[in-house]
Amino acid sequence: MLSPKIETERLILRRYKESDIDLQYEILTDSRLSKFITFPSLTKEEELECIRDWIKNVEDSQYEKWVITLKENNAPIGNISVNGIDRKNNYCNVGYVIAYDYWGKGYASEALKAVSDHLLNESGYYLVECSCNELNRQSSRVMEKAGFKKDGYIANRRLNKDGTYTGVEYYSKTKESVINEQ
Protein backbone atom coordinates (compact mmCIF):
# COMPACT_ATOMS: atom_id res chain seq x y z
CA MET A 1 0.00 0.00 0.00
CA LEU A 2 1.39 3.36 -1.01
CA SER A 3 1.40 6.27 1.44
CA PRO A 4 0.22 4.30 4.47
CA LYS A 5 -0.67 6.21 7.61
CA ILE A 6 2.48 6.79 9.67
CA GLU A 7 2.38 7.91 13.30
CA THR A 8 5.19 9.44 15.31
CA GLU A 9 5.23 10.82 18.82
CA ARG A 10 3.61 14.12 17.78
CA LEU A 11 2.50 13.63 14.17
CA ILE A 12 0.21 11.68 11.92
CA LEU A 13 1.23 11.42 8.28
CA ARG A 14 -1.74 10.55 6.11
CA ARG A 15 -2.98 10.66 2.55
CA TYR A 16 -4.40 13.85 1.07
CA LYS A 17 -8.04 14.88 1.41
CA GLU A 18 -9.77 17.68 -0.52
CA SER A 19 -10.02 19.63 2.74
CA ASP A 20 -6.21 20.01 2.67
CA ILE A 21 -6.51 22.66 -0.04
CA ASP A 22 -6.29 25.61 2.36
CA LEU A 23 -2.99 24.48 3.84
CA GLN A 24 -1.60 23.51 0.44
CA TYR A 25 -2.50 26.86 -1.06
CA GLU A 26 -1.14 28.74 1.96
CA ILE A 27 2.19 26.98 1.43
CA LEU A 28 2.23 27.68 -2.33
CA THR A 29 1.60 31.40 -1.83
CA ASP A 30 3.80 32.09 1.21
CA SER A 31 6.66 34.33 0.08
CA ARG A 32 8.73 33.30 3.13
CA LEU A 33 8.80 29.74 1.76
CA SER A 34 9.12 30.54 -1.94
CA LYS A 35 12.50 32.18 -1.43
CA PHE A 36 13.87 28.66 -0.87
CA ILE A 37 11.55 26.57 -3.07
CA THR A 38 10.11 27.43 -6.47
CA PHE A 39 6.42 26.55 -6.38
CA PRO A 40 4.21 26.37 -9.46
CA SER A 41 1.98 29.40 -10.04
CA LEU A 42 -1.41 27.79 -9.66
CA THR A 43 -4.79 29.17 -8.74
CA LYS A 44 -6.50 27.63 -5.75
CA GLU A 45 -8.85 25.73 -8.07
CA GLU A 46 -5.91 24.37 -10.11
CA GLU A 47 -4.21 23.23 -6.92
CA LEU A 48 -7.44 21.58 -5.77
CA GLU A 49 -7.52 19.68 -9.08
CA CYS A 50 -3.98 18.44 -8.37
CA ILE A 51 -5.07 17.20 -4.95
CA ARG A 52 -8.14 15.52 -6.44
CA ASP A 53 -5.89 13.80 -8.98
CA TRP A 54 -3.50 12.63 -6.22
CA ILE A 55 -6.46 11.23 -4.26
CA LYS A 56 -7.97 9.50 -7.31
CA ASN A 57 -4.66 7.96 -8.46
CA VAL A 58 -3.03 7.21 -5.11
CA GLU A 59 -2.86 3.45 -5.71
CA ASP A 60 -1.63 3.80 -9.30
CA SER A 61 1.07 6.38 -8.63
CA GLN A 62 4.60 5.33 -7.82
CA TYR A 63 5.10 8.55 -5.84
CA GLU A 64 4.00 8.48 -2.23
CA LYS A 65 2.55 11.67 -0.73
CA TRP A 66 1.59 12.48 2.86
CA VAL A 67 0.01 15.42 4.64
CA ILE A 68 1.76 16.12 7.94
CA THR A 69 -0.78 16.69 10.73
CA LEU A 70 -0.43 17.36 14.43
CA LYS A 71 -1.54 14.41 16.49
CA GLU A 72 -2.99 16.63 19.24
CA ASN A 73 -5.61 18.32 17.03
CA ASN A 74 -5.33 16.83 13.48
CA ALA A 75 -4.29 20.25 12.13
CA PRO A 76 -2.43 19.90 8.80
CA ILE A 77 0.93 21.70 8.94
CA GLY A 78 2.81 20.55 5.83
CA ASN A 79 3.50 17.77 3.40
CA ILE A 80 6.20 15.28 2.47
CA SER A 81 6.47 13.20 -0.67
CA VAL A 82 8.59 11.03 -2.91
CA ASN A 83 9.47 13.29 -5.86
CA GLY A 84 11.75 11.06 -7.87
CA ILE A 85 12.56 7.36 -8.13
CA ASP A 86 15.55 5.62 -9.67
CA ARG A 87 14.52 1.94 -9.81
CA LYS A 88 17.77 0.84 -11.46
CA ASN A 89 19.85 2.09 -8.54
CA ASN A 90 17.10 1.54 -5.92
CA TYR A 91 16.81 5.02 -4.47
CA CYS A 92 14.27 7.81 -4.23
CA ASN A 93 14.21 11.54 -3.61
CA VAL A 94 12.02 13.04 -0.89
CA GLY A 95 10.83 16.63 -0.55
CA TYR A 96 9.02 18.27 2.33
CA VAL A 97 7.60 21.61 3.34
CA ILE A 98 6.16 22.85 6.62
CA ALA A 99 3.95 25.93 6.95
CA TYR A 100 6.18 28.76 8.14
CA ASP A 101 4.38 29.22 11.46
CA TYR A 102 5.45 25.68 12.44
CA TRP A 103 9.16 26.07 11.65
CA GLY A 104 11.67 25.48 14.44
CA LYS A 105 9.58 22.98 16.39
CA GLY A 106 11.18 19.77 15.06
CA TYR A 107 8.13 18.66 13.06
CA ALA A 108 9.93 18.49 9.71
CA SER A 109 12.78 16.31 11.01
CA GLU A 110 10.31 14.05 12.84
CA ALA A 111 8.29 13.58 9.63
CA LEU A 112 11.38 13.12 7.45
CA LYS A 113 12.84 10.50 9.80
CA ALA A 114 9.55 8.57 9.85
CA VAL A 115 9.10 8.66 6.06
CA SER A 116 12.72 7.85 5.25
CA ASP A 117 12.68 4.92 7.69
CA HIS A 118 9.44 3.70 6.07
CA LEU A 119 10.95 3.97 2.58
CA LEU A 120 14.12 2.14 3.59
CA ASN A 121 12.50 -0.56 5.74
CA GLU A 122 9.02 -1.10 4.30
CA SER A 123 9.34 0.03 0.69
CA GLY A 124 12.74 -1.58 0.23
CA TYR A 125 14.79 1.34 -1.08
CA TYR A 126 18.53 1.18 -0.47
CA LEU A 127 18.92 4.97 -0.26
CA VAL A 128 16.74 8.03 0.27
CA GLU A 129 18.05 11.41 -0.81
CA CYS A 130 17.04 15.01 -0.18
CA SER A 131 18.36 18.36 -1.29
CA CYS A 132 17.92 21.99 -0.36
CA ASN A 133 18.85 25.49 -1.40
CA GLU A 134 22.17 26.36 0.23
CA LEU A 135 20.56 29.42 1.83
CA ASN A 136 18.01 27.30 3.66
CA ARG A 137 20.10 26.42 6.72
CA GLN A 138 16.97 25.26 8.55
CA SER A 139 16.37 22.54 5.94
CA SER A 140 19.98 21.35 6.21
CA ARG A 141 19.48 20.95 9.96
CA VAL A 142 16.20 19.08 9.39
CA MET A 143 17.96 16.51 7.21
CA GLU A 144 20.85 16.08 9.63
CA LYS A 145 18.46 15.64 12.60
CA ALA A 146 16.58 12.99 10.59
CA GLY A 147 19.79 10.96 10.17
CA PHE A 148 20.87 12.13 6.72
CA LYS A 149 24.51 12.79 5.86
CA LYS A 150 25.69 15.52 3.53
CA ASP A 151 26.95 14.03 0.28
CA GLY A 152 27.86 17.13 -1.65
CA TYR A 153 27.18 20.56 -3.01
CA ILE A 154 26.74 21.95 -6.50
CA ALA A 155 27.12 25.69 -7.01
CA ASN A 156 24.60 27.78 -8.99
CA ARG A 157 22.24 24.83 -9.43
CA ARG A 158 18.89 26.42 -8.50
CA LEU A 159 17.18 29.42 -10.08
CA ASN A 160 15.63 31.62 -7.40
CA LYS A 161 12.44 33.61 -7.77
CA ASP A 162 14.45 36.86 -7.98
CA GLY A 163 16.44 35.58 -10.98
CA THR A 164 19.63 34.79 -9.06
CA TYR A 165 21.17 31.35 -8.72
CA THR A 166 22.22 29.54 -5.57
CA GLY A 167 23.85 26.22 -4.85
CA VAL A 168 22.15 23.03 -3.76
CA GLU A 169 23.22 20.79 -0.88
CA TYR A 170 22.61 17.05 -1.27
CA TYR A 171 21.97 14.63 1.60
CA SER A 172 21.26 10.90 1.80
CA LYS A 173 20.35 8.17 4.23
CA THR A 174 20.87 4.44 3.61
CA LYS A 175 19.36 1.30 5.03
CA GLU A 176 22.65 0.66 6.88
CA SER A 177 22.43 3.99 8.67
CA VAL A 178 18.93 3.11 9.94
CA ILE A 179 20.14 -0.28 11.18
CA ASN A 180 23.12 1.35 12.91
CA GLU A 181 20.78 3.82 14.70
CA GLN A 182 18.85 0.98 16.35
Image: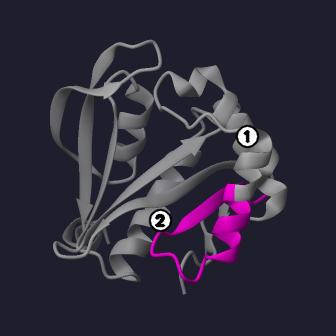
Q: Secondary structure at mark 1?
A: helix
**177 and 48: which is toward the camera:** 48
**131 and 60: which is toward the camera:** 60
Q: Tell me: residue 5, above or below residue 51.
A: below
Q: Can you tell which mark lies on residue 115?
A: 2
Q: Is residue 27 inside the magenta stretch?
A: no
The kind of residue tagged 1 is Tyr
> In this image, 2 relative to 30: left or right?
left
Quarter of the figure that contains the N terminus: bottom right
The kind of residue tagged 2 is Val
Res. 61 in view:
yes
- The residue tagged 1 is 25
Q: Residue 67 location, x and y as percent?
A: 66, 59
> In this image, 69 relative to 158: left or right?
right
What's the distance in space between the residues labelled 1 and 2, CA to CA? Answer: 23 Å
Q: Residue 131 location, x and y as percent?
A: 32, 43
Magenta residues?
A: 50-73
